[in-house]
Image (cartoon, helix red, strand yellow):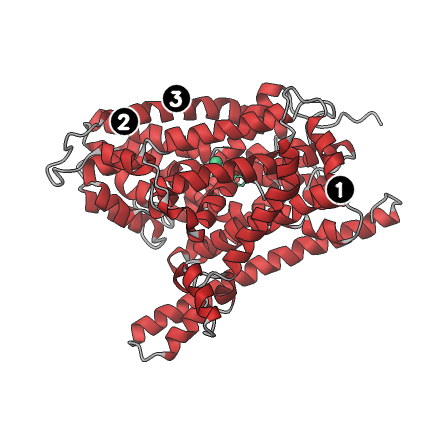
Amino acid sequence: NTIVKEAWGSRLGLILAMAGNAVGLGNFLRFPVQAVQNGGGAFIIPYLICFLVMGIPLLLIEWSTGRYGGKSNNHSTPYIMDSMGKGKIWKYVGVFGIFTNVAVVAYYTYIESWTLSYVLHSILGTFEGMSQSEVARFFEDYIDIGKSTLGIPYEAVVFYVLVLALNVFILSKGLGGIEKVAKIGMPLLILFGVLLSIKGLSLGESGQSEQFPDASAWDGLNFLWTPQFDSLTNPKVWLAAAGQIFFTLSVGMGTIQCYAAYIKPKEDIALNAVSAGFMNEFVEVVLGSSIVIPIAAGYLGLDWVMENAGFGMAFQTMPFLFQQWGEIAAAFAGVFWFGLLFFAGITSSLAMGTPWMGFMKDEFGWNKNQGAWSFGALALVMGLPTVLFYQYGVFDEYDYWAGTVSLVVFALLESILFSWVFGINKGWREINEGSDIYIPNFYKFIIKYVTPLLLLLVFVSALITPENNDWALSLQGLGEGQAWQLDNSSIIRQISHFGLKEQLALDLPGSLKLEIENKIFYSNLARTLLVGLFLFISLLVYLSQKKRQKEGRTTS
Ligand code: PHE
Ligand code: NA
């Protein structure tokens, strides 16, 4: 076989692409919100523990299984997993590793498109002279697709399609295109991040605004970084911490396996995996926590931040806060901040395109153009409803089922496959082969027992979260013969819309009922699309298996 196998151009390219994959909107937008909502310093300890006992092990598992799959020319999880564990089921488990990416990219690129639009608006000076509430309203108008701020009809949709097309274009250039974007984007991202962090940290204690004379950037930092031990027994905080570690490291998604499948057989993975993981953590805990929170706390006060912490916060506040630094500085800060977010976003969304492309190439011989455009089309079909019905929560539904629950389920199954089906001894050998560092032996124990057990714990507790998240009281109530009450946030109750249907039965004003009915309708729409996507990819896996059998290529 004289065909040159596709591979990464250089080690630097690989590391930057992998770091670009991990470093994303999660570091700058999701992490601060999660930390604030889960008690600041109370969040940090579970978060760091989850990084060490779930994050690092899963990175090692995914990098090594990816490289292992690449040796037999498999570049996406259905057949990577198939090559590790005989039995039909694993290739269908592997469907997750394509499904999640398509579903997440659909809404992820939407946020990415906001960042691009906000770069433009910063340059155009749109935010000049706006008050805080005007900047906040600008965001609301922006996502209301009927309105337009640039005079372009359906502006939000136009930017969304544009950003998707840009992703498709880069993906059609193959790994080389991704490497190039990472080589430009990552250094700029770090540079912008450091500049903004210095500014954020130098705001200091002095009141920055007349409106909130007591506001202090240091309050924000102290809140985040004063460890508190009282919440260590609260499973909700642990769930949030684990969820954030998964999302931010891109584990449980299938992208790392895919990237790693293009590493040459004897090349190091252990050092690469650990460095990319630590690089992501640096960007998250150092840069990610010293921009939005301190700057917002410095001008608006910590109380305001805690009340308003949410995903759109950075879009609703930062352009106003930058204005306080003067017109020119505001334009630069806006370009740095939203440009940073854009690079963080695109290097991640590109990663999400590769498992689908790898699969279609391996199984159906599709070239890069076909792979990239079909990926774009799929993402558009999944994504348009999130854009058009954003206010009805299609977006949140995707983020919950595809961006959170699926990650945990898939990670749990792959860690079982790795340690218990493939076998930890073989697995450990895969991790260490060609390694440039020595991974302490106790990690073998962690990977075999601690990681799957914790994952199971996380999953089960999300499935059956008790009322008010109060485990102690619920267990005690059980002992006293009381029925176990599930919280609305538990997966089981959410699947059946139980809380919502209960509310519908109450005597409520019509407008509220309509809102609830809409919520049920649109989340059913979102779930139908997600299930449809999963079945569609499963069907492709089924067809590919038939094709392999006909061609006499071995598969179970
Ligand atoms: N890790 C990325 C972030 O922090 C998100 C992501 C998840 C990227 C999965 C690729 C795959 O934003
Ligand atoms: Na990240």
**Residue 520, placed above or below residue 223:** below
Say which label, 3 or 1, has the lower sequence index.
Answer: 3
Distance CA(mark 3)–CA(mark 2): 15 Å
Q: Is residue 500 left or right of residue 537?
A: left
Q: Is residue 517 left or right of residue 535?
A: left
Distance CA(mark 1)–CA(mark 2): 48 Å
What residue is drawn where x is 62% and y is 33%?
443
Tell me the element at label 1. Answer: helix
Mark 1 vs ligand 1: CB under 8 Å? no
Q: Give the residue number, with chain letter if any, for mark 3.
A: 191
Which of the two residues, 552 or 241, is positioned nearer the viewer here? 241
Quarter occupied by the N terminus: top right
Q: Give the residue number, with chain letter if any, for mark 2.
A: 201
What residue is drawn where x is 61% and y is 56%?
533
Count neighbours of disc 1 (C-alpha within 10 A) and say few if under 14, some if 14 to 19, many if 20 or more: some
**Residue 34, placed above or below residue 258:** below
Q: Nearer the viewer, mark 1 or mark 2?
A: 1
Say which label, 1 or 2, has the lower sequence index.
Answer: 2
Image spot of residue 12 (x, y percent): 58, 19
- Asked if the residue at tag 2 contacts the one at tag 1, i.e. Cβ–Cβ closer than 8 Å, the answer is no
Q: Amino acid at mark 3?
A: Leu
Distance CA(mark 3)–CA(mark 1): 42 Å
What residue is drawn where x is 75% and y is 45%?
421
Image spot of residue 215 (x, y percent): 17, 37
Image spot of residue 21 (x, y percent): 53, 33
**Residue 182, placed above or below residue 62:** above
Q: Give the residue number, with chain letter if any, for mark 1.
A: 422
Which of the two residues, 280 or 96, is positioned nearer the viewer here? 280
Q: Amino acid at mark 2?
A: Leu
